[in-house]
Each structure stands twice: as C-alpha cells, then as structure tokens.
Image: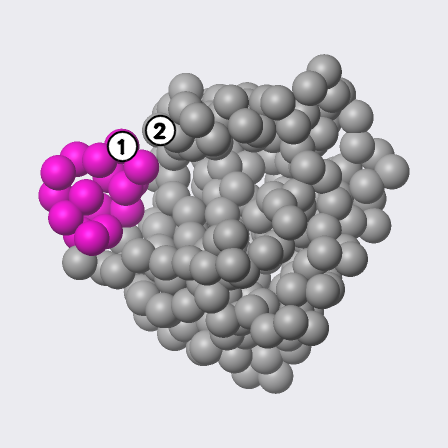
Amino acid sequence: MATFVLVPGFWLGAWAWREVTGQLRAQGHDVHPMTLTGLAERHHLAGPQVTLETHTTDIVRLIEVEDLRDVLLVGHSGGGMPVAQAADLIPDRIARVVYVESGPLPDGTAQFDTVPPQEQQRLRAAIGDGHLLPPPAWDPTADPTNLAGLDEPTLSLLRERSTAQPLRTATDPVRRTGGRPVPTALVASTFGLAVVRQMIDEGHPFFTGLADGQLHELPTGHWPMLSEPKALADVLDLIARG
C-alpha cells in the first residue's frame, strides 16, 4: 500500500480526482485528493491574497497534520508548481513527486512564463484588473488536443464545476530552497516520450528535473484523470510499486 496526495491543476478541485481516487483505494492505497485554497468548494476563499505560496502551504499542512510519510505527491498541470515547492520544503516525507502533464519548473519561473506571448496578452485582457484567471470554455472544437477523450457529460461537468483560478498562483515564480532532491516521475498524455526524452537530452529547462525520473506515457488529452481515470490509476499504481 502506498500513500497518495493528489493535487489538481488550474480551475479544478478534489472532485476531479474522484474516479482515480476510487480506483487507487480499490487497489489498497491510502489516497488524499486535495482542493487548494480558492477553488471548487473553497472558492469563497479566493482573493488577491491567495498566492502560489498559499497553495504550497495547503499541501504541506495536509501532509504534516495527517502525519503522512513516504508520500507519492501527484501534481497535475499547474498543480505541479506547488507540488514542487512542497516537496522541496518537506523532502523527508515525500517518496516521489509525480508530475501529470506537468514538470518541475526551474527556480524563478512562473506558469505564466510557459505560455506564448499572444496567449499571455489574451489572458491578461480577460483578467483585466481582477485577481482571478477565468476557466476555459471547455470547447473541444477550439481545443481538440487538450480536450481529447472527454465526452459531453464530462465537458458539461467541467463547465459546471470549474472555478476561476487565483491569478498569483499562475504569475508567482517557483522558488526552491535548494534542499535534498526528491525522486520524480512523469505521466505524459498530450506529448510522446520520444519528445520528452529529446527535450531532456537538449537540456530544456522544463524537463531537466526529470532526467533521472520514471517516464510514463498515457495517450489522451490534458485531463487524464477525467478522460482515462482507470488507466491513470493503473500508471500511478505502477509508479508506487516501482
């Protein structure tokens, strides 16, 4: 049995991990899906004071209060940033960080920095003077690659349940203390492992932290916990046994 902490990406809460959680528990694992401050059922706490550091503290406090050890800390997409920071702060409690459609961003890099300039301009126009990043339209015709594998009921659920993301969790840079490194794993869905390995070999900053990690491929869209929950749970179970 392994202990999992599941951290969702932008706009989602613990609800997005429901099927994966059920599968992992059926396999005998201890599983803690999280909702970060300002999202989903905690959306009433959203505000300009919610930062990347807030989300990092959410993760650290859950692990410490529940006295979890040998944790497989899973971060999906934008959840990879607070997961990386949390593992850096409490490495003795983390067995492995698992990046799902994510990666260990270099120190000083924000999620917003990974977005092309035109998309940054579009997002800033949508945000205006506010402090929340609105969710996407969840339109598969406009975003077929990322939304691959999601049926209409699931898309409707995303439109109903997704909530705006506290902006500073996307614009604050990742900060590392330089502490003991923690083993890593990657689950890649929208890009193949051949591409990942090439980028690692080329020293791409978004993937160099995975050079010694486990690499797994799960072909589907950007939200595998919703499009392929059983397959994702099986990959996570495999990582736990590795």
Residue 78: image location, x then y, percent: 52, 42
Residue 224: image location, x then y, percent: 50, 65
Task: Please name the residue shown 26% across and 60% down the image.
Answer: 192
Label 2, on which residue?
106
Taking the magenta stretch, the answer to whether it contains residue 207 is yes
- Specify the quadrant of the image occupied by residue 134: top right
Span shown in magenta: 195-211
Asked if one can make out residue 25 in the rendered structure from this viewpoint, the answer is no
Residue 242: image location, x then y, percent: 33, 70
Residue 205: give its label.
1
SS for dot 2: loop
Task: Please name the residue shown 35% across and 29% down the image.
Answer: 106
Circles 2 and 1, Cβ within 8 Å, touching? The answer is: yes
Residue in the foreground of this view, choosing between 28 and 52: 52
Taking the magenta stretch, the answer to whether it contains residue 3 is no
Residue 217: image location, x then y, percent: 32, 66
Looking at the image, tell me whether mark 2 or mark 1 is earlier in sequence order: 2
Residue 15 as seen in the image, left or right of residue 98: right
Give the CA separation, mark 2 to mark 1. Answer: 6 Å
